Image: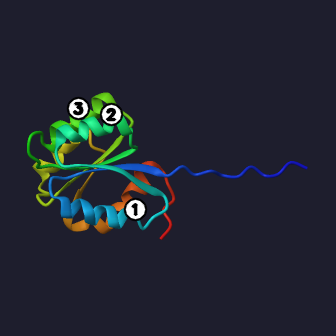
Amino acid sequence: MDAAPTLRVEPILILLVDDFEPFRTILREVLERFAEFIVVGEAGDGRAAIELALSLEPQVVIMDVSMPHLGGVEATRRIKRILPGVHVIGVSLNDDPYTQDAMKAAGSSAFLSKNCTHQLPRLIGTLTATVVQN
């Protein structure tokens, strides 16, 4: 009798991009509570985000909108051109419709206010079709 196949679930690889290091630390702490997620890298600006996305090939990029050197909108546009399958989640304290629309036009999969980071695990699970255990 053959054994039933085991379901192997690969963790979701995540890149954090924000110029404010304490916020990246908060995001990392929130995400590392879940076995389904692995934070593979962090970047403080859009240029570094593009380089890391190319080398690390994450499934999800959490992208701040406003950063020095290269902002999140343009960084998202460039990452999506090179890695079209990656899910970019735009984050900002400024969650007005213009900011959300700019990120969406650049190719982001979703947008989340920085005040709602507790919703991030569920959002990532939805985007990646991953069951997230609490």
Q: Is residue 105 visible?
A: no
How far is mark 3 from mark 2, CA to CA? 11 Å
Residue pointed to by mark 3:
78
Q: Nearer the viewer, residue 80 or 43?
A: 43
Task: Point out the tag, 3 or 2, that comes first from the N-terminus.
Answer: 2
**Mark linked to residue 35:** none
Which element is circle 3 on? Answer: helix
Q: Do the residues under discs 3 and 2 have CB atoms within 8 angstroms?
A: no
Picture quadrant where residue 114 is located: bottom left
Q: Which residue is drawn at the image coordinates 50% and 66% (left, top)?
A: 133
Amino acid tagged 2? Leu
Task: Point out the tag, 2 or 1, that comes first from the N-terminus.
Answer: 2
Residue at the limit of the structure toward the right, as seen here: 1
Picture quadrant where residue 108 is located: top left
Which element is circle 1 on? Answer: helix
Residue at the limit of the structure toward the left, as seen here: 68
Q: Is residue 28 above or below residue 54?
A: below
Q: Position of residue 65 (x, y in %)?
A: 15, 49
Q: Is residue 24 above or below residue 107?
A: below
Q: Which residue is drawn at the image coordinates 35% and 35% (left, top)?
A: 55
Residue pointed to by mark 2:
54
Q: Position of residue 68 (x, y in %)?
A: 8, 45
Residue pointed to by mark 1:
122
Q: Is residue 13 above or below residue 75?
A: below
Amino acid tagged 3? Arg
